[in-house]
Amino acid sequence: MDLKALVRLALVAAVLGFGSRATAQESVGVNIVVIEAAKSGQGIDKRIQELKLNGPIEDAGYTQAKVMDELETQVARESSVTLEILKKGGKARNLKVTVLDVDVKNDAVKLEVSIPEFDFKTTTNHKKGGRLMVAHKRSKDSALFLAVTPKLAPAP
Amino acid sequence: MSRDRQEHSLEALLQEHLSQELQAVAPRFEDFTAGVLARLDEAHDPEALQMALRADTPSAEELADARMFDDPAYELAGAFLREDTEAELAAVDFSAFAQGVWDGLDAEALAPEVAAALKEEVAEAVAAREGAWADFAAGVMAALPAETVTVAELLTEETEAELAARDGEWQAFTARVFEAVDAEARSLVRGTVDEQAVRLLRAEVEDEVEALGPRFDARFSVEVDREIFKAGQGPAPWWKKAWDWVHGALQPGHGLGWAAAAAAVVLLVVATGLPPSPDPTLPSGALAGTVTVEQLSFEGNVTVMPDEGLTVVWLSDVR
């Protein structure tokens, strides 16, 4: 086999091989952090600082922030995970995250994030671990921050 | 006719006229008057008044719930209650009632002395009612929370209790997190850079395996441990990576023959070099990547604040 034929074969192999790996991943790691912040009091949870989520919280003037809940799970393509973010007075509020699409080659994930009780829904494209934070001012001095981070597992 | 009998007659006449006025001139006013009288009775009974007010006031739980979600309707409930009550109290117009009675007396074409006496009686009765009503209105308004504090004061106790209840959950969770963080911090202080890298990788993988749980069997964990061990040995030479890749390509189901895989290795080495490895300098949790908002629907005000690695969507005016 001459060099040209070898190169041609290698190109076909590379395209087929890498292509099959790029479409192999069918689930995405999804991390959801529920944070309650207040303008009274002091102290940002270490976990929030560790995740580097304190920036927008502090920028908005909140001096105290606590992690109320955190969920890390795998979600299959076209599937969703729902986390009850608060339940007061018998009314549940849920954060729903649906994985719409996964592009391993470009390290990109398309999500639909919604809170049905708020009639809120958004579709977002996350590249290379980009994060979405939904913030909701609950009163003059307190707010709820919901951080959603998709994470592609390393290719097998 | 003696003076007593005349007064008795006047009083009976007054009662009759009042009754006629209430029925004929303003039926709606009659119902309202009955309500007024009932409220006057309540005014002398603080417990009954309090119960009546409570019946019109959202429950503490509803208000606490509203506060948690900044519901404008409930947030202003205290202010609205005060405004409504004030308007209702102000709507009671005794002068209109008196005027109606006087008009009725004029229509009867009574003797001037009789009409004047009746009007005087009515004026006194109305004045007495007005005074009692003013006291009642003042009592009602005093029982309502001041406009400037409204919901905040009503909610303080419930919110604090709720926060205290949640605090217990937070403490348990945060204690666990802090424990893990502290353990990692201690491990970082010790050991060489290579050991730290291996330890971090192992912890990360272990967390992943633990999260995925039953989906992976023991064999997977063994493979992971092997990878961690290899990571601790430093980067593999290029020929080793190439060989591993070829070995992987030969596994069943990969869809490639040995010759194709070997050719791919040759091409990679000769023409393009080895595939790039992930950037090892990027710390876990660092802000990286981008987020773009493709679609968004919300019945309220939304502010999208894109930033490097983190896009914040602010929701306000939640229904």
Image (cartoon, coloured by chain):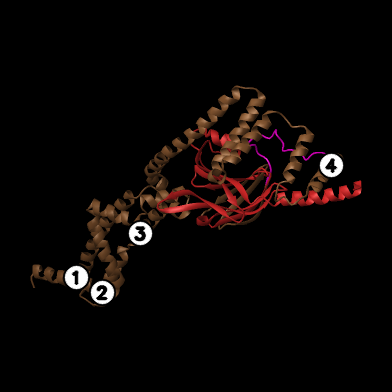
Chain colours: A red, B brown
Residue B53 picture location, percent across and down: 31, 54
| Label 3 sits on residue | B90
The mark that comes first in sequence, 3 or 4, is 3
**Amino acid under disc 4:** Val
* Residue segment shown in magenta: B271-290
Residue A61 picture location, percent across and down: 56, 38
> Is residue A60 visible to us here?
no
**Amino acid under disc 1:** Leu
Question: Would you place residue B150 above or below residue B229 in this image?
Answer: below
Distance (Cα) linking label 4 and label 1 = 118 Å
Distance (Cα) linking label 3 and label 4 = 94 Å
Q: Is residue B163 left or right of residue A149?
A: left
Are discs 4 and 2 both within one chain?
Answer: yes
Q: Is residue B23 left or right of residue B316?
A: left
| Label 4 sits on residue | B266
Chain identifier of the residue bearing label 1 in the image: B
